[in-house]
Amino acid sequence: MTLNMSRDKLFIWGIFLFFISSSLLWINIPVTRILQLVSVVLFTMSYTYRIKSMRNTKYPLFYKILILFVFLWGLFIIIRGSYDNIFSILRKIYNADGIFEYMAPLLLFFPLYKYFKYIQNILVKILCLYIIFIFMNLPMIINRSEGVIPLISVFYIFLGGSLPLLIIFFDYLSRKQKIVVLIASSVMGLIAIWLARRELLLGLLLAYLFYLFVWFAKQKHRLLKLIPIGAVVLIIYFYLLPTLFNLSFFQNVTTKGFNDTRTFVEVYFWNDISQDFNTILYGKGIDGMYYAPNIDPTSDYRYSIETGYLHLLLKGGVVYLILMILIFLLPIIKGLFRSRSNVSKCAALYLLHVLCMMYPGNPFRFLPSFFLMWLCVSLIYSENKFKHENCIHRPYIS
């Protein structure tokens, strides 16, 4: 039993080592690739051993069939790629939109729910690393130096991407962990405003809105609590926000916030993909590209699109889009409407948060946010077998 536990933790650390090393790409490419390959060997070997000796989470039959279809369609997407040389294979291993994106349903056969607290502690430690990296690059951020926006994006998706989950599960954190989350939220919010990163700001605000929903659902006298909350929201909406956004500090985000920078890319995408019905239905595979001139300086063809729904269409077509929506929509319904567990409700709200963020962003890649989605599914469907609040998920007393 002890050996299995250590191998399980090795598997989890292997995955997070992959995410951490991916964030270091801007420092040293060869070192990053070596670390990524080491982490891949680490978590694949640990998973292979563990899957042979475990009892899987008992999902409903229909959901098991759905998992099987999603996995098989992912394999269909992978085999349609080009594997001409070792470099094309390696690119599909260490890229976030590589083979692990489509192998992710296998995570549901690993008991992630048992290690929620352990994963949560790792996430907070990585969030500390995110804060350190931000302060190390503070002069670039303040001066809005060239290349700072891609750098901040990399830091967020690989190191700070767990922040929405930690906000929604805020009541299950220790006092020190809550302080880290609040500091990271403040730092991220200020950066999002200063650099006009609408996606970061929207994701942060939506996460706190969902936490407010969780907090409000726990109150006994809900109607009495609603009055002061409503008053505060109205004051912020009608007085504070207009005042703040008129200041020069906020003008960058307000100016960009009303500029449409996505539609013309999506028009290029639809013009390309709509030329063939089979492409709409089945997608273009793992190496799928679409014609979008004058977007990227190096090529008129792009491998990815910033909108999550369209990314799924590009790679796997309408079939893959429907399968992926279903595999997360069903746990959302179960967690929100068919469960009395607060942990399940928080997990469902996180899944809903990611689905809502699929328009301004693309979370459906092998990133921390994507990994945490499968963790939340595991939490929701393990509810009847494991009492969350009475065992591994009991909140710290602060």
Image (cartoon, rainbow, N blue to C red):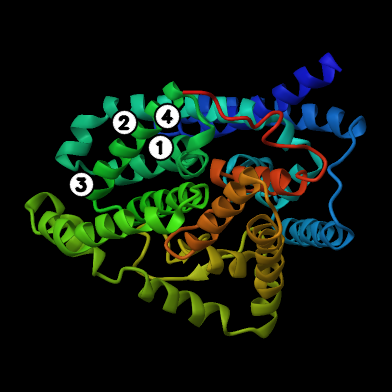
Q: On the image, numbered disc 2 is attached to which residue?
A: 134
**Looking at the image, which residue is at 68% across and 50% down?**
340
Element class at badge 1? helix
Q: CA distance from mark 4 to mark 2?
A: 19 Å
Element class at badge 2? helix
Asked whether the beta carbons under mark 3 and mark 1 sit within 8 Å of each other, the answer is no
Q: CA distance from mark 4 to mark 1?
A: 20 Å
Element class at badge 3? helix
Sequence order check, earlier mark of 4 and 1: 1
Q: Is residue 148 left or right of residue 360?
A: left
- Residue 332 disc label: none
Asked whether the beta carbons under mark 1 and mark 2 sit within 8 Å of each other, the answer is yes
Q: CA distance from mark 1 to mark 2?
A: 8 Å
Which of pointers 4 and 2 indicates the residue nearer the eye?
4
Q: On the image, numbered disc 3 is attached to which residue?
A: 194
Which of pointers 3 and 4 indicates the residue nearer the eye?
4
Q: Is residue 40 left or right of residue 270?
A: right
* The quadrant where residue 26 appears: top left
Q: CA distance from mark 3 to mark 4?
A: 24 Å
Residue 171 in view (yes/no) = yes
Q: CA distance from mark 2 to mark 3?
A: 13 Å
